[in-house]
Amino acid sequence: MSILQSIILGIIQGLTEFLPISSSGHLAIIPYLLGWPNPPFSFLVLVQVASLVAVITYYWNDILDISRAFIFALRQRKLFMTQESSLAVYIILATIPAGIAGLFLKDLVETAFKTPLAIAVFFLITSGLLALAEKFGRRFKSLKDIHSKQALIIGFFQALAIFPGLSRSGSTISGGMLQGLERPSAARFTFLLAIPILFAAGFLEIFDLLNAPGSSLFIMYIPGLIASGVVSYLSIRWLIRYLTNHSLYIFSLYCLFMGVLILLFQQF
């Protein structure tokens, strides 16, 4: 991987991690369409870590409030005593399905990254989920209105996104909207929910990378990581504002276009 490829893929990661159009799908298919070698799996995880830094930076004050409330509630043995402590519990619950999927399906996911047909199908599924959420989501609840069962259901939607082409933010926002959350609240919960998953995946991959031969290749990743972090932060800020007054249909159409494009490319 060249430095230029690292930067381009980092920008793509930053644009697509939080927009509901699948960063993993783009990082898998763009090199294929351009004739580049597949990026190392470690790079794919580490650019997500850069996105993690961006979302932590954006929601830093919220994270502090939620963490303090949860620790205090834990000491009082009343986990649902405040809205912030309840939100921490819901984030933990919603993380469980994706965590289990990540542990047991890693090899299958790596194989999917090398299968354009599978990526095309997952893009089409993302398109359908976004359209269904807009069509059938009631969208009148804020985060203070959700409960444990809804959080767990949203977590199962996030678990779907372990495969490339199935957008993590798209699946989770769709799951939130189908549970009645308004768009900005669904997006906020989605971004907060990304933190533990991205952290766990990044920690494990960095550990493996530092203990593997040729770990010095990490230097080639740095430009892409910086690009990913900066663009991710800008994408979060833009999407939260966009969803206040706009639907998900434009993203649904884009994922439909990507899925069809990949299928057509396969024929030539």
Image: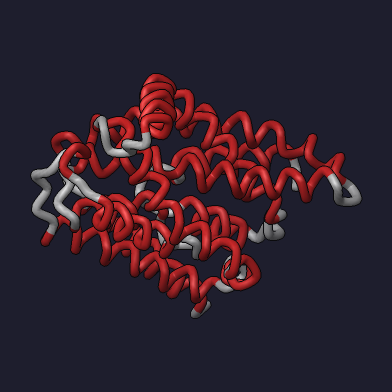
Q: Is residue 171 left or right of residue 222?
A: left
Query: Residue 4, how many percent across, how many down?
Result: 68, 38
* Residue located at (14% from left, 36% from top): 245
The extreme right residue here reads 213
Name the one closer to the observer, 193 or 71.
Answer: 71
- Is residue 13 depicted above or below 235 in this figure? below
Task: Tell whether 52 sits left or right of 38.
Answer: left
Q: Residue furthest bottom?
A: 267
Colour convention: secondary structure
Q: Residue furthest front?
A: 76
- Residue located 29% across and 41% down the image: 187
Residue drawn where x is 71% and y is 59% of the image? 37
Q: Quadrant of residue 64?
A: top left
Q: Is residue 234 visible?
A: no
Q: Position of residue 17 (x, y in %)?
A: 46, 45
Please report the residue visible at 45 percent of the width from the left and 40 percent of the height from the top: 15
Residue 51 location (% of width, % of height): 52, 36
Q: Nearer the viewer, residue 190 or 120?
A: 190
Q: Is residue 41 visible?
A: yes
